Amino acid sequence: MGLHRVVALVQPPQAEFELASAAEVFGLDRPNLPSRYGFTVCTERPGIVATKTGGALWVDAGLEALEAADTVLVPAWTQKDLPASPAVLEAVRAAHARGARMVAICTGAYLLAEAGLLEGRRATTHWRYAAEFAERFPGVDVDPDALYVDSGDIATSAGTAAGIDLCLHLVRSDHGAALASRIARHMVMPPHREGGQRQYAVEPVDEPSESLGAVLEWAAEHLHEALSVEDLAERGRVSARTLARRFDDQLGTSPGQWLLSQRISAAQALLEDTDLPVESIAARVGLSSALNLRRRFRDRLGTTPAAYRRAFGRDVVGAG
């Protein structure tokens, strides 16, 4: 299997975190993990590229690097308020027309929109710029809450750390959940975050009891128990109605759906990393029976636990 070529298009002053996030996912060879991607950085004028924090990058590849890209990635576009050069726009359009996947992190969506690639499509960007983006590009269906939006040939993400969410999602789409999970573990972060941007776009509350953090941590440690929404509400010392409101405000989902997502994620990890029978896994994640686990798995993931293990078990990911 040949390497999937990811080419990051940067411009001065480049936002380092967004570029580093993509490089961390696609550009590093890690022990005991198969290499699936090649990573290149290019710019319109090769040479020194200034960064937002005062450092500099040396980039020796020009726009011609986009001609060989399987994925073109724009890790933020700091000059979003200025017109992009005709050469950059032409190179981006040509890459998309050729069949390259286009990916934008944070303000990188501005470049794709200016190139006309987001017209009539759903997309996202940092919540702080969502209203401005929608006004500037009225033909784009802007989702201000999504951490990322993937429509196959084009994907966009919210700001900063959401770029990692998107990059891991692309690995999951390309090569399965097991590889994405292992990369995430090397990065010491979850392979998938729940909720949307609303949990970050609001001002922090003054009253500590408003936070769901302690309830979520407790629930994650007790998934093997038959937890109910009422159990979570009691733990948070609020009514079930108040708990539901806080879940919607902070995570964009209901307590019941969050619990189910956590249980399925825990089951995925056990299927990938252990040889436990499905019945035992179901008990460990609080889904009571193998039959219930199979039903929930098919409803949520469109597959069975056995098929998932065959596709993403540790022996499969370790191969190659």
Image: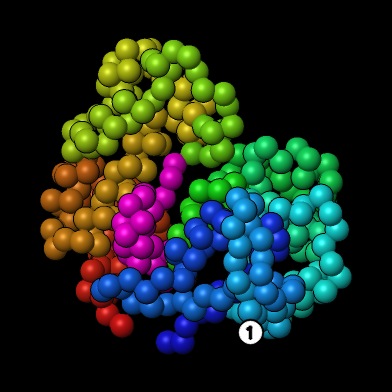
166 or 287: nearer the viewer: 166
**Going 32% across and 12% down the picture, which residue do you hit?**
237
Q: Is residue 34 left or right of residue 81?
A: left
For residue 295, say whether it is visible: no
The image shows residue 31 at horizontal and vertical percentages of 28, 72
Percent coordinates x, y for residue 41 in the rendering = 59, 73
Number of marks present in the image shown: 1
181 falls in the magenta region: yes
- Amino acid identity at mark 1: Ala
- Compared with 241, 247 (above or below) is below
Residue 128 placement: quadrant? top right
Q: Residue at x 37, y 74 (%)?
A: 29
Query: Which residue has dot 1 on it?
Result: 68
Q: Which image quarter is the C terminus in?
A: bottom left
Pick the quarter of the image with the N terminus: bottom left
User: Percent from the top left, x then y, of residue 136?
Assistant: 84, 46
Question: Taking 232 as reference, is 222 above or below it?
Answer: below
Magenta stretch, main secondary structure class: helix
Q: Position of residue 153 (x, y in %)?
A: 64, 68
Looking at the image, is 319 positioned above or below residue 280? Answer: below
State the SS at label 1.
helix
Which region of the structure is painted magenta? 172-194
